Image (cartoon, rainbow, N blue to C red):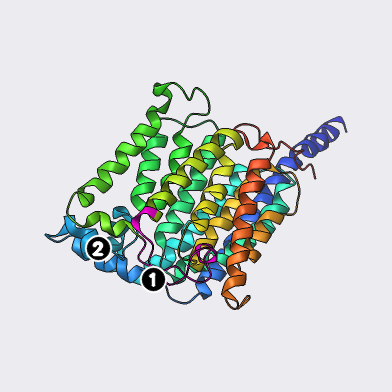
């Protein structure tokens, strides 16, 4: 009788862990199902992928250094163009699969990094579903680069919160910039959180810049290449810029440089004062505020940034910031007026920056909510 009692008590002590693991697995299964369903039912990717493929052919030709002179519309990094050339024989189906699995990996990292915390599951289930419904936009526009950068950002957040930042963080950031230049915010994860006045503390950032330079410089030293840095789209009527300047005009190269510099500064400040979980949301908000375009494939990264921020910095069960991000960056079929969409974009992005600035210090590394883990 005593042995049975001991066994039962032992079983009761072990069951919460088993239940937690089962619930986490069930949450991941649900989010995986939604991503597979959403991306699987989306239309075949197209959009900018054709630009990437055409540029990929130049990359393996004798004019490889003139890549951005011949293909100014390929507004992405050399590594993405190399990847486009690599998967071209397989076709667009490979792009869809890669974007699909990037989404699943993002969900898996979020679930794994917050495993066992009861109040996070409802937040991830609801917020992750909202993110999954926006994820097909990356597939439709063929932007594997944005999917990869989003995945790399989540990896960087998870590693930074676990105290795993090393010199390799700089290499990781440099590679991300090689995938897409707007990933310059990734350098924030390599930035010091203390000792800013010491040059030695910035060594990891210097490594990231060096890696990015090695990837980009061979294509930037030829005449005309730097002209490709300017946005190749006119100011769209539903962009934030259209609220302040006339739409239809083509912005200068200065706008792109300002966008990159502002993104990096905000990312570093967010990391320093609000922790790694705040970096992605704040960075994408700055990008959207200063971008002449308002493409729907920008939205998944913004929604992901909100979800990451809420996952690691709040204890509420409902992911209000994620849901508002998903709704207020409204598609044309939901809000027909260009001006209304532009104002919604402005309010949403400014709101994100205010939320990050006013947020408590639970986002700091090692200070994420440690709410009571489920015991049933």
Residue 3, compared with residue 27, is above or below; it is above
Tell me: 223 left or right of 81. left
Residue 59 in view of the camera: no
- Secondary structure category for the residue under label 2: helix
**Magenta includes 241?**
yes
Residue 6 in the image: state x and y as whole percent: 82, 32
Graded by Cα atoms within 10 Å as few (under 14), some (14 to 19) or many (20 or more), the crowding at tag 1 reads few
Q: Would you say residue 56 is visible in this rendering?
A: yes
Q: How many marks?
A: 2
Determine crowd level at label 2: few under 14, some 14-19, many 20+ residues with C-alpha closer than 10 A: many
Quick one: quadrant of the N terminus?
A: top right
At 61% from the left and 53% from the top, the residue drawn is: 350
Q: Which residue is mark 1?
A: 93
Q: Is residue 271 magenta?
A: no
Q: Main secondary structure of the magenta part?
A: loop
Camera-side residue of 340 and 141? 340
Residue at x 57%, y 60% (from the top left corner): 32
Which residue is rendered at x = 17% and y = 55% of the image? 223
Marks 2 and 1 close (CB-CB < 8 Å): no
Is 36 displayed left or right of 183 in the figure? right
Q: Position of residue 302 (x, y in %)?
A: 56, 56
Judge from the rendering whether residue 18 lies leftward or rightward of residue 41; answer left or right.
Answer: right
- Position of the C terminus, as image quadrant, is top right
CA distance for labels 2 and 1: 17 Å
Name of the residue lying farthest toward the front: 245
Q: Is residue 57 above or below residue 226?
A: below
Height in image: 304 above or below 240? above
Query: What residue span does the magenta drawing correspond to?
Result: 231-254
Reading the image, the residue beneath label 2 is: 56
């Amino acid at each position: 009788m005593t042995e049975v009692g001991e066994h039962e008590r032992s079983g009761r002590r072990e069951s919460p862990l088993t239940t937690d693991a089962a619930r986490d697995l069930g949450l991941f299964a649900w989010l995986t199902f939604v991503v597979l369903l959403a991306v699987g039912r989306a239309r075949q990717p197209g959009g900018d992928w054709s630009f990437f493929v055409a540029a990929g052919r130049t990359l393996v030709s004798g004019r490889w250094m003139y890549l951005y002179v011949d293909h100014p519309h390929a507004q992405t990094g050399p590594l993405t163009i190399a990847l486009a050339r690599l998967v071209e024989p397989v076709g667009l189906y490979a792009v869809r699969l890669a974007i699909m699995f990037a989404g699943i990996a993002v969900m898996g990292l979020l679930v794994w990094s917050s495993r066992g915390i009861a109040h996070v599951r409802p937040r991830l289930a609801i917020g992750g579903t909202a993110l999954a419904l926006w994820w097909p936009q990356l597939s439709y526009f063929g932007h594997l680069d944005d999917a990869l950068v989003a995945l790399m950002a989540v990896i960087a957040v998870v590693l930074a919160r676990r105290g795993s930042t090393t010199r390799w963080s700089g290499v990781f950031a440099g590679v991300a910039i090689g995938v897409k230049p707007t990933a310059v915010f990734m350098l924030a994860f390599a930035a010091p959180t203390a000792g800013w006045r010491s040059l030695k503390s910035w060594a990891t950032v210097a490594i990231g810049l060096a890696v990015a330079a090695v990837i980009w410089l061979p294509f930037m030293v030829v005449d005309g290449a730097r002209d490709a840095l300017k946005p190749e789209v006119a100011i769209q009527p539903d962009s934030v810029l259209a609220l302040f300047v006339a739409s239809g005009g083509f912005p200068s190269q200065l706008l792109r440089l300002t966008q990159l510099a502002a993104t990096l500064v905000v990312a570093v400040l967010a990391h320093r004062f609000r922790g790694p979980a705040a970096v992605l949301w704040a960075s994408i908000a700055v990008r959207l505020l200063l971008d002449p375009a308002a493409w729907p494939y920008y939205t998944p990264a913004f929604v992901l940034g909100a979800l990451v921020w809420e996952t690691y910095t709040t204890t509420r069960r409902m992911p209000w910031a994620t849901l508002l991000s998903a709704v207020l960056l409204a598609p044309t079929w939901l809000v027909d007026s260009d001006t209304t969409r532009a104002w919604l974009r402005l309010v949403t992005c400014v709101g994100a920056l205010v939320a990050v600035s006013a947020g408590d210090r639970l986002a700091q590394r090692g200070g994420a909510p440690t709410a009571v883990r489920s015991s049933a």
